[in-house]
Image (cartoon, helix red, strand yellow):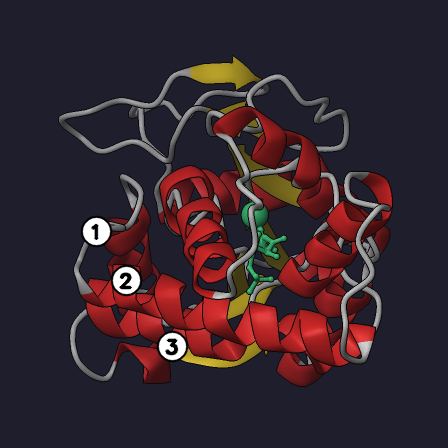
Amino acid sequence: MAELKALVFDVDGTLADTERDGHRVAFNRAFEAAGLDWHWSVERYGELLAVTGGKERIAHYLDHYRPDLEPSADRAQFIADLHREKTSHFMAALASGGIPLRPGIARLLDEARAEGLRLAIATTTTPENVEALIGHALPAGAMDWFDVIGAGDIVAAKKPAPDIYRWVLDALGLRAGDVVAFEDSAHGVCAARDAGIAQIVVTTNGYTEQQEFASATVVLDALGEPQDPARCVRGAPPALGYVDIAYLRGLVAARE
Ligand code: XBP
Ligand code: MG
C-alpha cells in the first residue's frame, strides 16, 4: 500500500515565481554585459521556455532565432560563459530578496518536517540557484531540510525527460508511489509522470496557466494559505482551501 513518505519540489515556477522577472531579466543583463543586442521580451521568453535548461535555451535561440550569428569562439564555451554570467545576475536578484517563495511553500515545508516526511528537489536549474533561493528565502540551515537535491546537469536529459525525477527517487531510496511531486509546467508534469509518480500537484503561473496538465492529480493557482485560499482549476480541491499534509495523504491513499 502506498504511503506518503516524501514531497519532491520543482523549483522554478513552483517554489518561487522565478521566470519572468528573475531568469528572463538575468538573461537580458548577461546579453547586455556581453555586448549582444539580444533582448528576450516577456512574450519571447514564454516561447523559449519550451526548452528547459538555460544553456539549452540559449542554443535554441541561436539556432532558431539568430541563425545569422556564428559565435566567434567555441560555441559551447560561448554559451557556457554567457550562462555563467546569467547565473551571477540571477543570484544577485535572489540576494536582493526580489524573488519570494510562492504562497504556502514555507508553511507546507514546516508541516512536512513536523510530520517527519522527507523533502527533496527535482529541478532543471543549477545547484547554485537552488542554494541561493533557499539560502535567501528560508531560515539558516534550510538546505539541510532537503535529503536530496537533484538539479541541473546532474542528469543529461532535462525535463520533460524523467531522468531528474528518477535520479531523485533513487537517491531517496523510495518508490514513486510514496511521494508527491509539485510542479508548475507541462514539461515538469511529464517528467514526474514518466518517472512513475502518480501524485502530481500543479501550481500554475503566468507562463503555464494555459498549458495542458492531463496527468496532474490537481491543478491549482497556488498551494494556498488559510487566509488566502487556492483556486482549484482541475481535480479534487483541498477541503480547507489550501494544500496541507492531510490533503496530500488523502491523494496518496485515494490512489490505492
Ligand atoms: C526551469 C528551467 C530552468 C530555468 C532557468 O527549471 O527550465 O532552465 O528556466 O534556469 P525547473 P537555468 O525544472 O525548476 O522548472 O538557467 O539555471 O537553467
Ligand atoms: Mg518549473
Q: Position of residue 82 (x, y in %)?
A: 58, 69
Q: Which residue is mark 2?
A: 94
Q: Give the mark nearer the N terminus: 2 vs 3.
A: 2
Dot 2 and dot 3 residues touching (CB under 8 Å): no
Q: In the rendering, which numbered label is found on residue 174?
A: none
Dot 1 and dot 2 residues touching (CB under 8 Å): yes
The response on whether ligand 1 sits within 8 Å of label 1 is: no
Q: Give the mark nearer the N terminus: 1 vs 3.
A: 1
Dot 1 and dot 3 residues touching (CB under 8 Å): no
Q: How many numbered marks does the figure carry?
A: 3
Q: Residue at x 25, y 54 (%)?
A: 106
- Within 10 angstroms of label 3, few (less than 14), some, or many (20 or more) residues? some
Q: Quadrant of residue 168?
A: bottom right
Q: CA distance from mark 2 to mark 3?
A: 10 Å
Q: CA distance from mark 1 to mark 2?
A: 6 Å
Q: In the rendering, which numbered label is found on residue 131?
A: 3
Horizontal placement of 92 versus 131: left or right?
Answer: left
Give above or below for 145 relative to 39: below
Quarter of the figure that contains the N terminus:
bottom right
Q: Nearer the viewer, residue 176 or 32?
A: 32
Q: Nearer the viewer, residue 90 or 164?
A: 90
Q: Position of residue 251 (x, y in %)?
A: 57, 38
Give above or below for 66 relative to 7: above
Q: Nearer the viewer, residue 66 or 168?
A: 66
Q: Residue at x 63, y 80 (%)?
A: 172
The response on whether ligand 1 sits within 8 Å of label 2 is: no
